[in-house]
Image (cartoon, rainbow, N blue to C red):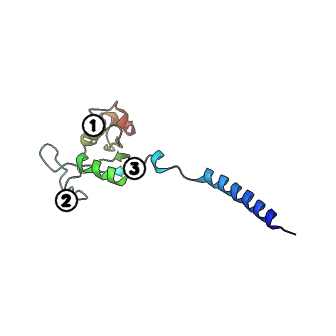
Amino acid sequence: MLTRRKFIGTTLVAGAALTASTQQGRPQPASKRTIVDAQVHFWKANSPDWAWDPGARPQLPEPFTIERALPMMDEAGVDRVVIVPPGLNNRNDYALEAARRYPNRFGIMAAFGWKTRNRRRCCRHGSSSRACSACA
């Protein structure tokens, strides 16, 4: 016959075993995880210094800049971002600028034309940089 003492003893042992096994399967605390947004487009306003290709239109009417992204990343808890140039022109320099200024926050997946012979040259002004390793 099951006594109260055996029931409580068995329940405590089973509870301890379940607690130990579920703690191993718990996700890491948020403070230990690195959150990476895998695709963000940065662009400057259309200007003679940073001209867009004819007919190109950005996702938003106003530029999405480095300075605009950083507070949004902080607010959302995003640690790092992979910048993908938006296709408004065939340039990677603004993405490279972001990675140079904030190397622990930004990395780059550089864009280049299919007919580009030397793709590394497409990452000009930083082809040896760690931030532009996707260009290799």
Q: Quadrant of the C terminus?
A: top left
* Horizontal relation, residue 59 to residue 17: left or right: left
Looking at the rendered structure, the secondary structure element under dot 3 is strand
Q: Quadrant of the N terminus?
A: bottom right
Q: Which mark is residue 101?
A: 1
Q: Amino acid at mark 1?
A: Arg
Which is more foreground, mark 3 or mark 1? 1
* Horizontal relation, residue 52 to residue 103: left or right: left
Choose the circle earlier in sequence order: 2 or 3.
Answer: 3
Which residue occupies the foreground of this view, 107 or 46?
107
Q: Amino acid at mark 2?
A: Pro
Percent position (x, y) of residue 119?
Answer: 34, 37
Choose the circle earlier in sequence order: 3 or 1.
Answer: 3
Looking at the rendered structure, the secondary structure element under dot 2 is loop
Which is more foreground, mark 1 or mark 2? 1
Percent position (x, y) of residue 31?
Answer: 45, 47
Please name the residue that numbered disc 3 is placed on: 38
> Disc 2, disc 3: CB below 8 Å?
no
Please name the residue that numbered disc 2 is placed on: 61
> Disc 3, disc 1: CB below 8 Å?
no
Give the class, few, some or many, for how many residues have Cα within 10 Å of label 1's Cα (few <14, many ≥20). Answer: few
